[in-house]
C-alpha cells in the first residue's frame, strides 16, 4: 500500500475508533444512566469511578485504552512509526471531539495510555507510575493525568526517537488544554478529588 494512503487511512480509521464514546455506552447499557449527568460530567474513567463505581470505571478505562491501542498498533504493524504516530494522534482527537456526541467528548487520557503502550510498552508503565504517584500525593485525577501525559514526551523520545518526542509533546499539550476547566477549579480550590478508596453504592 502507498505510504500516503496508509497514513490517511490510518488517521480516518483511528479517528472513528477513538470517537466511540464507551463511557456513555457503558453507563447506558449496564447502569441505566448517562455518565455525563453525574460527577464532573466527563465521559472518562475518572468520572465513571465517581458515578458508576469501580467495575464501571475499569470497563471504561479498558475500552477507552483499547480504542487507542488497537489502531495505533495496527498502523505501526502495517507501515511503521509515521502511520502509528498519525493514528495515535487521530485516536485522541476522536475521543476529544467525537462526531457521535456532537463533536464533544472526553479528555483523551485513557486513550493516550493505550496509545503509549502500543508505541512502546515501557512508556505505559511510566505513565501509570506517574499517574498513581501524583494522585496518591494530591488526590486529584486531573493532576495525575496532566503530569503523566507531560512525562510522555521525553519517555517516548528515549524509546522511539524524535517521532516519539514530537507525538508525545503534541498529544500532552492537547490533553492539558482539555483540562483547562480542571485547572481553573484547581486554582479556586473546587476541583473534585478522586475517591480511590470509596465504592459508590451502585458498584
Image (cartoon, helix red, strand yellow):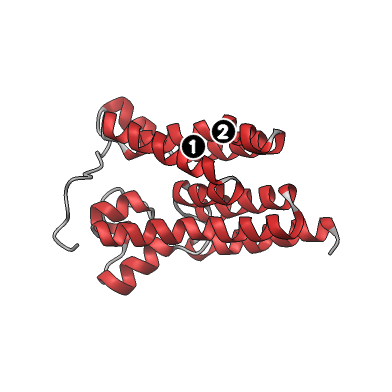
Task: Relative to 162, say whether 203 is above or below.
Answer: below
Residue 107 visible in image: no
| Closer to the camera in the image, 43 or 53 | 53
Circle 1 crowding by C-alpha within 10 Å: few under 14, some 14–19, many from 20: many
Query: Percent position (x, y) of residue 136?
Result: 27, 34
In the rendered structure, the answer to whether residue 182 lies left or right of residue 49 reads right
- Mark 2 or mark 1, earlier in chain: 1
Residue 12 visible in image: yes
The part of the image, by quadrant, that contains residue 55 is bottom left
Image marks 2 and 1: residues in contact by CB distance under 8 Å? no
Query: Percent position (x, y) of residue 77?
Result: 70, 58
In the rendered structure, the answer to whether residue 59 lies left or right of residue 31 reads right
Q: How many marks?
A: 2
Separation (CA) of disc 2 from disc 1? 10 Å
In the rendered structure, the answer to whether residue 48 lies left or right of residue 154 reads left
Residue displayed at 50% across by 64% down: 20
Residue displayed at 33% across by 74% down: 29
Residue displayed at 18% across by 45% down: 197
Residue on which the image places disc 1: 149
Q: Where does the N terminus fall, quadrant-wise?
A: bottom right
Residue on which the image places disc 2: 155
In the rendered structure, the answer to whether residue 175 lies left or right of residue 131 reads right
Circle 2 crowding by C-alpha within 10 Å: few under 14, some 14–19, many from 20: many
Query: Percent position (x, y) of residue 105?
Result: 46, 54
Amino acid at each position: 500500500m502507498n505510504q500516503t494512503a496508509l497514513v490517511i487511512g490510518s488517521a480516518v480509521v483511528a479517528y472513528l475508533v477513538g470517537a466511540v464514546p464507551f463511557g456513555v455506552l457503558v453507563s447506558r447499557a449496564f447502569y441505566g444512566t448517562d455518565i455525563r449527568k453525574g460527577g464532573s460530567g466527563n465521559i472518562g474513567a475518572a468520572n465513571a469511578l465517581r458515578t458508576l463505581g469501580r467495575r464501571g470505571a475499569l470497563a471504561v478505562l479498558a475500552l477507552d485504552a483499547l480504542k487507542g491501542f488497537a489502531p495505533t498498533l495496527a498502523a505501526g504493524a502495517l507501515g511503521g512509526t509515521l502511520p502509528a504516530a498519525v493514528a495515535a494522534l487521530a485516536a485522541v482527537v476522536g475521543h476529544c471531539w467525537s462526531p457521535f456526541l456532537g463533536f464533544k467528548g472526553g479528555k483523551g487520557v485513557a486513550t493516550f495510555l493505550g496509545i503509549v503502550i502500543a508505541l512502546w510498552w515501557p512508556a505505559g508503565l511510566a505513565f501509570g507510575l506517574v499517574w498513581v504517584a501524583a494522585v496518591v500525593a494530591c488526590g486529584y485525577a486531573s493532576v495525575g493525568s496532566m503530569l503523566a501525559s507531560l512525562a510522555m514526551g521525553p519517555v517516548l523520545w528515549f524509546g522511539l526517537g524524535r517521532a516519539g518526542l514530537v507525538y508525545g509533546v503534541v498529544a500532552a499539550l492537547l490533553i492539558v488544554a482539555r483540562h483547562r476547566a480542571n485547572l481553573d477549579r484547581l486554582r479556586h480550590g473546587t476541583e473534585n478529588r478522586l475517591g480511590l478508596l470509596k465504592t459508590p453504592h451502585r458498584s
